[in-house]
Image (cartoon, rainbow, N blue to C red):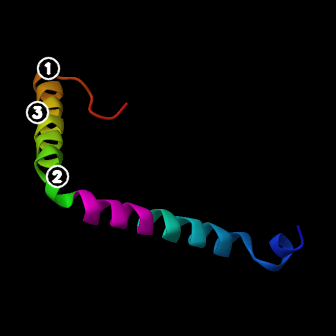
Amino acid sequence: MVYKKLIPKKTNMLWTIAVVLFILWLLGLVTAHAFGGFIHFLLILAIIVVLIRIIRGEKIVK
């Protein structure tokens, strides 16, 4: 594979990140109306779990 020698690894990694973010952005556009409420539910659930761990005295980050 000759082209790998021509493209630096940083550029290759940046392109990979850009493509992944673009796909996630498109997925968000398509599913915004269907899953908008679900995302808020997951956010509230995560906050409740963190609060319960704080109240119990457990460390949030191990």
Q: Which residues are magenta?
A: 22-31
Label 2 Cα crowd, 10 Å radius (few <14 / some 14-19 / many 20+): few
Q: CA distance from mark 1 to mark 3?
A: 12 Å
Mark positioned earlier in the residue sequence (1 or 3): 3
Which of discs 1 and 2 lies nearer the camera? The answer is 2
Q: Are marks 1 and 2 in contact (CB under 8 Å)?
A: no
The residue carrying mark 3 is: 48
The residue carrying mark 1 is: 56
Residue lying at the far top in this picture: please name it: 56
Percent from the top left, x then y, of residue 26? 35, 66
Residue under the point 14% across and 20% down: 56
Residue 34, disc: 2
Q: Amino acid at mark 2?
A: Ala
Residue 21, disc: none
62 part of magenta stretch = no
The overriding secondary structure of the stretch rendered in magenta is helix
As displayed, is residue 49 above or below residue 15?
Answer: above
Q: Amino acid at mark 1?
A: Arg
Horizontal side of 51 relative to 19 (left or right) equals left
Q: Amino acid at mark 3?
A: Ile
Mark positioned earlier in the residue sequence (2 or 3): 2
